[in-house]
Image (cartoon, grey):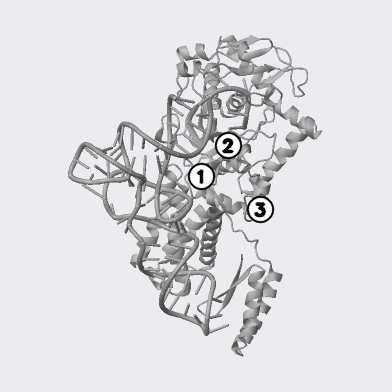
Amino acid sequence: MSELFIYNSLSRQKEKFTPINAPHVGLYVCGPTVSGESHLGHARPYITFDVVYRYLTQLGYKVRYVRNITDAGHFEEEGREAVDKIAEKSFLEKLEPMELVQKYSNLYHWGMKEFNNIDPTIEPTATGHIVEQIEMIKIIIEKGYAYEVNGSVYFDVKKYAESHEYGKLSGRILEDLLETTRDLEGQDEKRNKVDFALWKHAAPEHIMRWASPWGEGFPGWHIECSAMACKYLGNEFDIHGGGMDLLFPHHESEIAQSSVVNGKAPVRYWMHNNMITIEGRKMGKSYNNVIKLTELFSGGHPMLQQAYHPMVVRFYILTTHYRSPLDFSNEALQSAEKGMKRLFDAYEILQKMEVSKHNESDHAINKEIEKFCLDCKEFMDDDFSTAKVIANLFELAPIINGLKDGHVKTNDMSASTLQLMKDTFENYLIQVLGLKPIQEVSNSKLDEVLQVLIDLRKEAKVKKDFATSDKIRDVLIEKGIQLKDEKDGSVSYSIL
RNA sequence: GGUCUUGUAGCCGAGUGGCUAGGCAAAGCUCUGCAAAAGCUUCUACACCGGUUCGAAUCCGGUCGAGACCUCCA
């Protein structure tokens, strides 16, 4: 079995990955709150963990991949009234809460498909697991780590910290947290400011509400992940992923809740992706730089110079390691677009190459190629270093191009090396990184039409009628079709 | 203010103490009727100041800048 190393946020270092029940692996990723349209910020975690899922699968693990949908309302931030977020917005839009949730869930799923993310194996919703959440809260109360006030239930952090390490994941110190000076809504009900809600009493105007032993209300934010992860992955599971912003309080609270209920910490490896910035600034409403996925793919945002294909965005995200911050700019995306095209051009050439069975050359180039290919696995094993994998594929591109135009001698390459190179592109570019060519598979009609134009241009060139031949070339490039005169005199085209 | 992360050539970004990724852009050359595409070549950077070391982008300390979180915001 492979030696995969994963950076564990809990220990702040890379650890060898050993599943609890190999070959089975449990993977939980915090999904979106579907009270609004998915934006660029959502792209990173889901692409990051899609690659994690793909790679684990390729290593031979049988992965249960759970990614929830938060469709029960939560609160607005400080200074605002405690109004159910989903309920409030649905009032403005005159929609039923579940209608709103459905609309944004659909948009989210559409975005995930555009990014070529594989569906999780289970996608549970918070509203579908109210019963499980209530059961969990009951146990926490029974064990004495939660208390009820006016129909709301709070987790007693101070008591928990007496026998557990609260703050270990996020590096918080309880004493510091207790001294926090911010005054927030509902503080008076809590014994300590650090306590967090497990269940909230619903005021009459709340539309989303469920019956519970403590009256009508709705679940606290953190309990849903604990309940759903526990239900589908067990009391202790392998990997929990999410954005760095969720470290505290969300994941810290998850650990606390699950530890009380199950008597042990729920997660072996915590993985957190870093955040996205836009032209050096964090994404936020006040900066007016929140780019929705629909805007990103259509170019319909003031900050965007053009539309960016989902695959370009995916490629760009994967050229940076998932734990590093990632800045979006037009320049960076355009450069990614060109780079990715170069890679896929090489991939296409490679696919068409024939492997000659007899060649057993041991020319130095074979060793070179072999290293580039085999290193890819090593890079992925080192905490999913997709950036390095991509760099190695770029190293192979000029070799492939060289083979095509005769710069690199075909005879120098052994059949097994060529096959290895084919497998490497297929495995990493397509399977693991989950990328696919932008252009649609060219249909035969288009192919035939272009062949007519190519022939006409050839005839013109023979007659030295360069005005005509150049016109054909120029008109096509305007339409986004690039003719390429190959070294052997043939002509191919690519759709830009 | 506290905790954590981070600062690499024009831009984006890998970098495990010594062998100095990669992409985009730029320049030159080859190829071409001219181009495009492709190939070859060039462009040696690590915020700043100290320290450890034979040797530091990499370790330690400080300064400055950036980002995340600091309680119901995914």
Q: Nearer the viewer, residue A416 or A431?
A: A431
3 or 1: tag closer to the N-terminus: 3
Secondary structure of residue under mark 2:
strand
Chain for mark 3? Answer: A
Residue bearing the label numbered 3 = A299
| Residue A17 appears in the figure | no
The amino acid type, in three-letter code, at marker 1 is: Leu
Disc 2 versus disc 3: nearer the observer: 3
Cα separation between marks 3 and 1: 20 Å
2 or 1: tag closer to the N-terminus: 2
Residue A178's spot in the image, x, y percent? 50, 15
The amino acid type, in three-letter code, at marker 2 is: Tyr
The amino acid type, in three-letter code, at marker 3 is: Gly
Q: Which mark is residue A18?
A: none
Q: Identify the image quadrant of residue A227.
A: top right
Residue A55's spot in the image, x, y percent? 50, 45
Q: Is residue A84 left or right of residue A355?
A: right
Q: Nearer the viewer, residue A262 or A400?
A: A400
Q: Are both tags, 2 and 1, on one chain?
A: yes
Q: Is residue A494 left or right of residue A366?
A: right
